[in-house]
Image (cartoon, coloured by chain):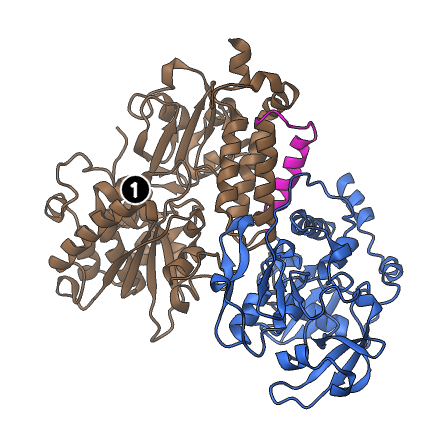
Chain colours: A brown, B blue
Amino acid sequence: MGKKLLLEHINVPGIETLEVYRQKGGYASVEKALKTMTPNDVVEEVKKSGLRGRGGAGFPTGMKWSFLYKPEGVERYLVCNADESEPGTFKDRFLMEHIPHSLIEGMITSSFALGAKTSYIYIRGEYFYVARILEKAIDEAYAAGLLGKNILGTDFSHDCYVQVGAGAYICGEETALLESLEGKRGNPRIKPPFPAIAGLYGCPTVVNNVETIATVCPIINMGGEEYAKIGIGRSTGTKLISASGHINKPGTYEIELGLPVEEFIYSEEYCGGIINGNKLKAVVAGGSSVPVLPAHLILKTEKGEPRLMSYESLSEGGFVSGSMLGSGGFIVYDETTSIVKNLYTFARFYHHESCGQCSPCREGTGWMEKILHRIVEGHGKPSDIDLLWDIQRKIEGNTICPLGDAAAWPVASAIRHFRAEFEEYINHPEKIKDIKHYYSVHQLAGA
Amino acid sequence: MAKVTIDGQTIEVPDGTTILQAARMIVDDKNYTGVNIAPPTMCYHSKLKTSGGYCRTCIVKVTKGSEKDPRPMPKPVASCRTTVMDGMEVVNLTSPEVLESRKAVVEFLLINHPLDCPICDQAGECHLQDLGYEHGLAKTRYDFKRRTFNLIDIGPYIKLHMTRCIMCFRCIKVADQITDGRYQGMLFRGDASEISTYISKAIDNDFSGNVIDVCPVGALTDRTFRFKSRVWFTKPMDAHRNCTKCKGKVSIWLKGDEVLRVTGRKDQWGEVQDWICNECRFEKKHVNDWVIEGPTHIDRHSVISANHYENLSSLKLDIGKQQKQLNKK
């Protein structure tokens, strides 16, 4: 069994209530931090732990916190990004739904470290029922004196609010999230200024993922150095992975970073192998926006070393032969999957979710979707593959926010690794007629 | 003060200046004889706060961040929204990558643009037209149906032709910052988004006409001028009158003795110098209303200025050639 920190007590009945959560050692980090540490000590512990943002980019959290601008007399805010909108990712929902207090605890401890009197949890609209769970947990915490004025008898006061979004992918981008939280249209802001200088209501703001904030609790409890011993290299600690797709046991798993990918997919403890004993075809390792990797590259790196579940190992080889850990949305495809159709689904999603502010993303995502639609309908042209490649190359890096990159990377990787499949679709449109949604042409040819 | 080098030209500018403003300062200098190194803009307007950053045509590459931190910036940046740092080095025309990215942006702007220039009132003074010509995008690779919208009259004077819109947000900023009360905004998202007024409410205030001047394309046109004449058949004259609402300094566009339309005076970057009121713009359509100062000097390299396309070759801005070099690499 790998080490569990966040999901240690997941099977304890009633863990969603404050009573059971405290019996199991909950809110220890709040007591430890507020009573025995200074805010700077907390930041230092997080720095020592080597914790990296769990939302996708993997930026060191301690570093992000130390960038926060702290002028006198200006409010600071902590905002929790619970707008988990990356397709294939559902780890935050699982955590908030079952152990809501771990997030509240992390919010209090982190806010203490940042000196934030108010914090917000911005949760996506589709998770309205989770918002209710969180609100109940917050009420319990207020009643127990863990939130509100003079928490646990110290002079630290803190208020935490839950704000439900309307369910837009773009609102997971931190500045769009802040705009939405302010009650405006959720459009990403043009940076600089970064939120650490001028974020929510123009005040310095830190935006962190749910899992990142929840992980602060075990770090404070066990100490940063101790936490840094878990994991591998610069990927310290544990990570929640949302495994989905053609596996026997889809679900949310907590893994120690550095676990071999092969073990994660095939061991009984985790995914339990591919469904129906089929062959592995490809894996999207970190949510829909990261490059898809074919079986031979996901299990072993180009150099022949086993690929590990860590920030470094998954991105080894750059985008030519590597991918990213991203948000931990681990989507597995078996041999029956059509990469082209899957890519069309992704492209449709990004087209639908593009905010429309900057031209490369607004126009390019729609263009890519239309071309892919033509290909999956059997009307593709031989020049379409190169055209797609050219469009994605021109979107990437030219946009305001990373949505453009997120739309471009899956297209690039699918063409890079599965070009033959695109050609098959274009050259033999008669084969793809009347086929089921997820059956690839190769499967059909075999049958 | 910060020293910044753009395409090999060094200038010292106050802190807080953007790369675009610095480039324009270089070009504006009387002693400067080189090519126009200021990046083109579609959405940035110096008189409007928080404008810019959307269209991405002004993107440049920062090859050296600053004296303190000489690392280059990883992605191309929007020059209209990026402030200079001391010792910053920027490449615009000298970088084939930048030109290629800009060409890509122009292509993206054009894929859903109707290309109805032959019947568009903006033709001849359209920034998108200029950009298209400059980047050699005579053909399109887009073979799908373009998105279309119905024409909307916003008030008695302004026509909104949403199909032509490139989402520069300038008119929204004008509505926000120049006129009182915001009636205009963006509906929907992605490539379905459209500029609209709140439930087809007419824009009714004294300065609403300025949205026509800031529109870089023909999406917002003057209903009193629609289909009257091609702009290159009219003669622009600087003129003024005593106005109680605005400064009254305008350009009037004459055909014979007839005032076909009145617009704000534009500087060499195609930006309005002074906002003018609706009375001046729409109601004073007689030569006797105006004191004519003389012909408007048209600086901007638009089709209404003579020999634009001959001048283009003298700029040595052969993008096609640079493109080939890039492909060889």
Report in which chain the residue with disc 1 lies. A
Q: Mark 1 points at which residue?
A: A93
Does the segment drawn in magenta span residue A324?
no
Q: How crowded is mark 1: few (under 14 residues within 10 Å), some or many (20 or more)?
A: many
- Residue B49 in the image: x percent, y percent? 55, 72
Which of these two is toward me, A22 or B121? B121
Residue placed at 65% from the left, 31% from the top? Answer: A385
- Residue B208 in the image: x percent, y percent? 58, 73
- Does residue B255 appear in the picture of this structure? yes
- Does residue B82 appear in the picture of this structure? no
Which of these two is toward me, A326 or A228? A326
Which of these two is toward me, B76 or A419? A419
- Type of the residue with mark 1: Arg
- Residue A138 in the image: x percent, y percent? 19, 54
| The residue stretch that appears in magenta | A377-398
Q: In this view, does B139 lie to the left or right of B53?
A: right
* Quarter of the picture holding the C terminus of chain B: top right
Does the segment drawn in magenta span residue A392?
yes
Q: In which quarter of the image is residue A73?
A: bottom left
* Quarter of the picture holding the N terminus of chain B: bottom right
Q: In this view, does A365 lie to the left or right of A256?
A: right
Element on which disc 1 rests:
helix
Residue placed at 80% from the left, 43% from the top? Answer: B324
B107 lies above or below A296? below
